[in-house]
Image: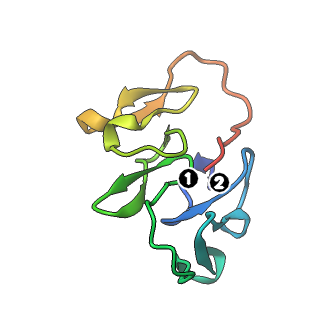
C-alpha cells in the first residue's frame, strides 16, 4: 500500500490489492484470521487441517511462517525462499543479495502505483 509516497508491504500474513493506498486496505491472507489494520496480527486459522503452508503473493516461507518480501520487492504465491523475491516494476536491486530495491533513475516521475501485496 502507499504510505507517504512509498510502497509499503502489508503486515505478515496479510495482503492488499494493486493500487492500495492505506494500511486499512490490508486483509488477512487465505487461511489466516485477524485485523492487520486494527493491529491484530493475522494468525493461521485453527481449522484443524495442519497441512502445508502456502504463502500469498509478495511473501515467502521462512521456518514455517510467511514473511513479507523486503520493501519494493514482490514474489509469486507459494514462494518458499527470500530468493523468490524480486524488485517490483520500476525498482532495481537484489533483495536476496541484501541490496535494497530502489526506484529506477529513468526519470519520468509521475504517480506512484503500488503492486498487490
The x and y percentages for residue 53 are 45, 60
Classify residue 70 as left or right of residue 104: left
Residue drawn at point x = 45 percent, y = 47 percent: 71
Q: Give whichever of 94, 33 is nearer the camera.
A: 33
Q: Give whichever of 99, 104 is nearer the camera.
A: 99
Q: Give whichever of 43, 50 is nearer the camera.
A: 50
Query: Which mark sits nearer the N-terminus, 2 or 1?
Result: 2
Which residue position holds label 1?
Answer: 56
Task: Look at the picture and state if 68 lies above or below 50.
Answer: above
The label shown at residue 1 is: 2
Residue drawn at point x = 61 percent, y = 63 percent: 29
Q: Is mark 1 on a helix, strand or loop?
A: loop
Residue drawn at point x = 53 percent, y = 55 percent: 9
The x and y percentages for residue 105 are 50, 20
Distance between mark 2 and mark 1 Cα atoms: 15 Å
Crowd class of label 1 (few under 14; some 14 to 19; many from 20; radius 10 Å): many
Amino acid at each position: 500500500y502507499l504510505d507517504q509516497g512509498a510502497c509499503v508491504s502489508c503486515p505478515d500474513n496479510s495482503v492488499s490489492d494493486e493500487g492500495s493506498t492505506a494500511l486499512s486496505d490490508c486483509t488477512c491472507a487465505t487461511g489466516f484470521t485477524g485485523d492487520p489494520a486494527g493491529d491484530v496480527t493475522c494468525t493461521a486459522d485453527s481449522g484443524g487441517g495442519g497441512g502445508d503452508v502456502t504463502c500469498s503473493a509478495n511473501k515467502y516461507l521462512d521456518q514455517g511462517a510467511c514473511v513479507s518480501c523486503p520493501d519494493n520487492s514482490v514474489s509469486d504465491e507459494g514462494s518458499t525462499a527470500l530468493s523468490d523475491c524480486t524488485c517490483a516494476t520500476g525498482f532495481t536491486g537484489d533483495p536476496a543479495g541484501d541490496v535494497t530495491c530502489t526506484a529506477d533513475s529513468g526519470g519520468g516521475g509521475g504517480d506512484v502505483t503500488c503492486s498487490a501485496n
